[in-house]
Image (cartoon, rainbow, N blue to C red):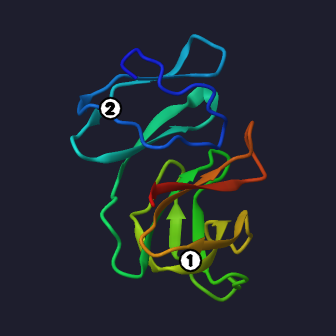
Amino acid sequence: MDGKSVLTDVPYGKASDYLAVKAGARQIEVRATGTSQDVINAKPDFASKKDYTILAEDFLANITPGVLTDNNAAPDSGKVKVRVVHGSPSAGPVDIYVTAPGGDISTVSPTVSNLAFKSATDYLSVAAGSYEVFVTPTGTKTVAIDTGAINLTAGQIRTAVALDAPGGGVPLSVILLDDLN
């Protein structure tokens, strides 16, 4: 960031905590570990007193920065806020089903329909509790990702990012980022 190394050896599918950044346009460079050539060289503008999530999106040859503005305002009492990001370059548009653990998606409509690669939903407000999330190619009930049970506690804010396997393709997976709490 701005010519200084702030994160090193970040493995695929992992995220850092928030970093303090001065407001204004900041130079962000990303390099594959062990190289000196930038794969991302961007200058996003950061507003004061806002939180952001920056993703390295797509395969290395086509990688771009995805800059998301986070909404870390507290959820309503007893609620959780969750945002979903489609970060799988191998998958086409997807439908997302949020159910109780062990839920059957065969007879229900998706919670989110036709989410394109590099797109993010708004934050969804849901009651605290246990959920299972299924991701399918749009218009099908063929499960590409099954998160298993996820327990969410009141007050949490999370971003779920769908990913390819390291190197691309299947099996697809999800990482859950702690935006707040």
Q: Amino acid at mark 2?
A: Pro
Q: Nearer the viewer, residue 166 or 110?
A: 166
Name the N-terminal-most of marks 2 and 1. 2
Residue most extreme to the bottom: 107
- Marks 2/1: CA distance? 33 Å
> Where residue 37 sits in the image (x, y, percent)?
56, 12
Q: Which numbered dot is residue 110?
A: 1
Which element type, helix, strand or loop, lies under badge 1? Answer: loop
User: Which label was assigned to residue 63?
Assistant: none
Q: Residue at x 48, y 61 (%)?
A: 158
User: Which quarter of the rendered picture does the C terminus lie within?
Assistant: bottom left
Q: Is residue 160 above or below residue 53?
A: below
User: Left or right: where does residue 179 sit relative to residue 25?
Assistant: right
Image quadrant in which the N terminus is located: top left
Q: Is residue 92 left or right of residue 82?
A: right
The three-letter amino acid code for the residue at tag 1 is: Pro
* Residue shown at the point (55%, 81%) measured from the top left: 129
Secondary structure beneath disc 2? loop
Task: Measuring from the top left, give residue 88's x and y in whole percent.
Answer: 62, 48
Looking at the picture, tell me which residue is in the foreground, 8 or 148. Answer: 8
Instruction: Return the x and y of residue 95 as percentages of the image width and height.
Output: 58, 68
> What residue is disc 2 on?
44
**Mark 2 residue crowding within 10 angstroms, few (<14) / some (14–19) / many (20+):** some
- Evaluate if marks 2 and 1 touch, with contact meaning CB atoms under 8 Å apart: no
Image location of residue 144, percent across then percent down:
73, 63
Q: Residue furthest right?
A: 171
Q: Using a 10 Å C-alpha cutoff, classify the residue at mark 1 as few (fewer than 14 neighbours), some (14 to 19) or many (20 or more).
A: many
